[in-house]
Amino acid sequence: MTSITLNYESCLLEIAGQRDDVVVLTAENRAALRNAPSALGPRFLDFGICEQTMVGAAGGLALRGRIPVVHALAAFLTMRAFEFIRTDIGIPGLPVKLVGAVPGFLSEANGPTHQSLEDIHLMRGIPSMRIFCPADIVELCEALPDIIDDPAPWYIRYCTNQPATAHVEPFAIGHAERSGQHLDAVFLTYGFLLREVLHAQELLASRGIRTTVLNLRTLAPIDREAILDVACRASHLITVEDHFLVGGLRTLVSEILLDAGFTVPVTSLALHNRWFTPGLLPNVLDNEGFSGRRIAGQIHNHILRRHQWQTHQDWIRATRQSPSQTTSTAALFP
């Protein structure tokens, strides 16, 4: 099956056809599961807009030997049902798979109530929880059998976008995918923003700035070795995520660097103490500074400014005193 014809429901139903223990639950989110009720019969359960009840029921089903795959909007799944996820699934470490729809910028025109920008922070706070952030439908379907086989609970940031490029490494839990070998700067990202980061990589290369991209895929477990490998040799790390600045990838990377005793400049592109302005996805990305063009412009300016200073301390002092002195990204990459 090609990426054009690949779809999540078919991948899930194929697994469910091979395993009688897989049950599919939803909180009235059937858009991606239209054929599941007829295909699965009593193994498909729609709880309506009752995420807490659904998660509690998933824990009970898991205790009875089932593998529940639970679907809801990411904002309501991870926040409204958080205590149930922590207590009923996380503490006993049950093999429930939580699928959060329209996470991050993928909520597009929805307002702050529906914007899931703290989901990574919340889910990584549960000790037994694992986290998968597919970049596209290919990664999602490739990883799904491994995730369902894994006895741990999982949170999946649902993404069915078409791939930006052919993946160069097969999916493996806890293993990042690397694009490029250059160390002028290294991008670390996850999810659908991989497309924009790869575009930024191309634009920067046209200006002589050679970069590497790490598609981290799973944030728990995260590929600590890959991050430390680039951190010890790269002149600059850049984290890019559609999440609040606090608690997401920037926090994860900082913890890893601190534990290893590494010091390396890190630029973080994330949402700092704010939600995003709703709109169509291309407009959201450009307005918020996360389109490939805008990412490339920001990083070009960061690197250019950093080269103007003699020491890392001078660089930190300068960015704190004049963070807005940058060249227009539109002028750099029209």
Image: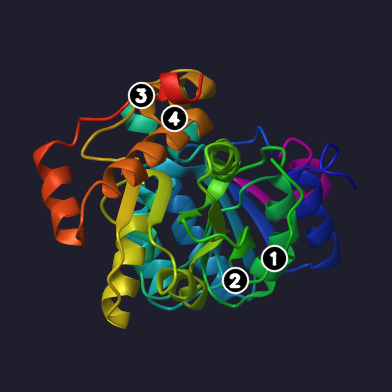
Picture layout, residue 29 above or below residue 87: above
Horizontal side of 259 relative to 33 (left or right) equals left
Please name the residue that numbered disc 1 is placed on.
171
The mark found on residue 175 in the picture is: 2
Q: Which residue is mark 3?
A: 111
* Amino acid found under the numbered disc labelled 4: Arg
Q: Amino acid at mark 1?
A: Phe
Describe residue 3's horizontal placement relative to residue 181 as left or right: right
Stretch in magenta: 33-46
- The label nearer to you, 1 versus 4, is 4
Q: Is residue 98 above or below residue 19?
A: above
Q: Is residue 146 above or below residue 240?
A: below
Nearest-to-viewer mark from 2 and 4: 4
Q: Tell me, yes or no, if residue 86 can be seen here.
A: yes
As measured in the structure, the alpha-carbon distance from the residue carrying label 2 to the one carrying label 4 is 28 Å
**What residue is drawn where x is 34% and y is 73%?**
256
Mark 2 or mark 3, whichever is nearer to me? 2
CB atoms of marks 2 and 4 within 8 Å: no
CA–CA distance in space, label 1 to label 4: 29 Å
Instruction: State left or right for residue 107 relative to residue 181.
Output: left
Does 41 appear in magenta?
yes
Q: Of the residues shown, which amino acid type is indicated by label 3?
A: Gly
Q: Residues within 10 Å of mark 2 (few under 14, many from 20)?
A: many
Q: Amino acid at mark 2?
A: His
Number of marks drawn: 4
Q: Residue 304 placed where, x, y %?
A: 34, 42
The residue positioned 42% from the left and 47% from the top of the image is 240
Q: Which mark is residue 294?
A: 4
Residue 248 visible (yes or no)? no
Q: Label 4's element?
A: helix
Furthest residue in direction right, as rendered: 1
Q: Earlier in the sequence, mark 2 or mark 3?
A: 3
